[in-house]
Amino acid sequence: MYIKENIPVFLLFSVFNLVILLIGFIDNSIPNIAVLYIFIFNLLIFIIYIVWDLIRRKQFTSDLAHLESLDDVVGMSSGSTPEQRMIYDKLDELRRTHQNELDRESQRTRENLDELTRFIHDMKMPVTTMKLMIDDLDGEPKTKLGAEWSRLNSMLNEVLYLKRLPNIKNDLYIEEINLAELLNISIKKLRDICMQKNIGFDIELSEPLVHTDRKWMQFVLDQIITNSVKYSRNNDIVINGNIINDQAQLTITDYGRGIKQKDINRIFESGFTSTSDHDDAQSTGMGLYLTKEVCDVLGINIEAASQYGEYTTVTLTFNLANEFTRITMK
């Protein structure tokens, strides 16, 4: 690279020394030894210049070669030649412009999220009023409207938790909780939909106590059970809690639509719905993504297994309580 950049310099040196040798060859009055001394002296000076130029360019060239993002410009050399300083100034200008654009976009995103949060909170009041009005109804209208209300409320909560997710670590309180209580709350929220779709629950928890955050664990169970109910009809959802290898494990199995094997590894991706049932209007592709993100923060391992057209099982494996957990719970 250096030689390519300095081809004119090398050519000029070569032509200059060839002219000296040519003059010495033509003019016999000039001793050959003098011509040789001049040639060697020029060559020595040229070598010293090349070494010096390589050394002064080396640091900047190395920094530039290892530059991975505009943020890295801050730590790189500002250059030792006018050309290098001009490149550095241009990169630094681009970095500042890029950072200003990011700051503006971040500010706009925060404002949009704040507006969205306020909108959802404003929606909560009429949604709560709707629930009270639905509870005053009887028969089939109550069941159908209750099911639609549950879907609406679930989607609003999903957006709220999506907004809170970036700051989840500031909103954790680890304590000993009873999974049976949280499961009952999740099932109660979906009571109207379960009645409409003739879905029951078979729950058996040999070990209901785990150590985690109550609010976020409730969100995880809400999402998993909602998914099971959404794609099931006329059967029971089986929930088991056991101790396996000294760790609490909760499995939730539904016998609904199931998931194809080509999709099973992608269900926790943001926005992924399905490759086979892509026209499913019920799916947003965010529920299981949020669930996985929350589980990662809580230290819960979540896995899914399925046979398309037969069943889907989601398994949650909880970490054992350690000294940090016990201190946190005090």
Image (cartoon, grey):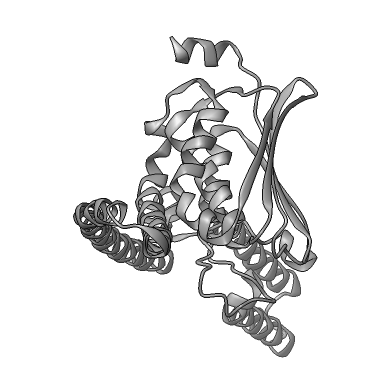
- In this picture, is 178 found above or below 225? above
Residue pushed farthest bottom? Answer: 26
What residue sits 35% from the left and 68% below the top? Answer: 90
**Quadrant position of the N terminus in the picture:** bottom right
Q: In this view, does 256 lie to the left or right of 154?
A: right
**Number of numbered tags placed on the structure image:** 0
- In this picture, is 39 found above or below 58? below
Q: In this view, does 93 lie to the left or right of 75?
A: left
Residue 238 seen anywhere in this rendered image of the structure: yes
Report x, y in % for residue 61: 55, 60
- In this picture, is 158 found above or below 86? above
What residue sits 76% from the left and 57% below the top? Answer: 311
What residue sits 43% from the left and 57% below the top? Answer: 79
Report x, y in % for residue 199: 61, 53
Asked whether 298 or 56 is in front, the reply is 298
Q: Is residue 113 left or right of residue 63?
A: left
Asked whether 100 or 273 is in front, the reply is 273
Residue 56 seen anywhere in this rendered image of the structure: no
Residue pushed farthest front? Answer: 139
**Quadrant position of the C terminus in the picture:** top left
Report x, y in % for residue 172: 42, 29
Residue 110 falls in which quadrant of the image? bottom left
Asked whether 58 or 224 is in front, the reply is 224
